[in-house]
Amino acid sequence: MARMPDLEKFSAEHGIGICTIADLIEYRLRTECFVHPVATTVLPTEVAGEFKTIVYENDVDDLLHIALVRGEINSHKPVLVRVHSECLTGDVFGSMRCDCGEQLHAAMKMIEQEGAGILLYIRQEGRGIGLLNKMKAYELQDQGHDTVEANEILGFQPDLRNYGIGAQILVHLGVRKMRLMTNNPKKIVGLEGYGLSMVEQVPIEMTPNEYNKGYLSCKKLKMGHLLKLNAKR
Ligand SMILES: [Zn+2]
């Protein structure tokens, strides 16, 4: 197989451009549709009332993503959107090692107050490394490492999440302009393009507790999250 130095020579000699596999993946995600709604129903929730609920399959992997939709989605108006990555321990058990469960419920309540919006629940556990590796990372954190170091010791990037499929689902639901609820600038970059633009970043900041304050300050310092972290404890 020709490697980059060979390709560069070949490209210059014949006047032919070079693109990478990553470029191809990105191009196909932008120009083709890989998502399919497979079930639509209504979920009444204790947290924030009723949501139209749509399950999406995609052609890229076996993950089923879920959209909770409130009100009418108008392509001409900015839509309040939260893209939430699955966190079993935080979302289901209310773990205080992170702020996921609180953020999930806060986002649902904000959408209820707004009267319209979408919570897109992406099934990429533990920033994309899966449940087992997330729990192993917790083990390492118990030994004194922070969340970024723990992922690196396990051989992962700090954040493996990919938002291309999520962006396609939002477009499929009729979203073009978003008021995106996030503290994470990387998520904004990951979702823009694909026919989506962000008109406003809506902060979704939880009060730190004694178990997650280290995790949250690591998100701020090492992962560029836009957190103030000065809330009273
Ligand atoms: Zn979490």
Image (spheres, rainbow, N blue to C red):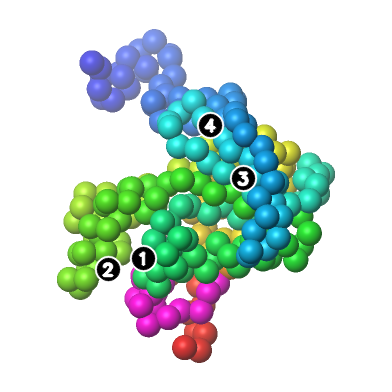
**Residue, disc 4:** 57
37 to 183, vertically: above or below: above
Q: Amino acid at mark 2?
A: Asp
Which secondary structure lies at badge 3? Answer: strand
Nearer to us: label 2 or label 3: 3
Q: Is residue 180 visible?
A: no
| In front of the other: 160 or 41 | 41
Q: Which residue is mark 3?
A: 67
**Among numbered discs 1 and 2, the one appearing first in the sequence:** 2
Q: Nearer the viewer, residue 164 or 94?
A: 94
Gap between marks 1 and 3 measured at Cα: 30 Å
Closest to the observer, 8 or 215: 215
Boundaries of the magenta span: 205-218
> Looking at the figure, which quarter contains the N terminus?
top left
Q: Which label lies toward us, 1 or 3?
A: 3
**Amino acid identity at mark 4:** Glu
Q: Is residue 21 above or below residue 186?
A: above
Identify the residue under disc 1.
222
Q: Are marks 1 and 2 in contact (CB under 8 Å)?
A: yes
Q: Identify which residue is drawn at 42% across, 46% down.
A: 124
Q: Secondary structure at mark 1?
A: helix
How packed is label 2: few (under 14 Cα within 10 Å), some, or many (20 or more)?
A: some
Along the horizontal axis of the image, is 71 left or right of 106?
right
Q: Is residue 158 magenta?
A: no
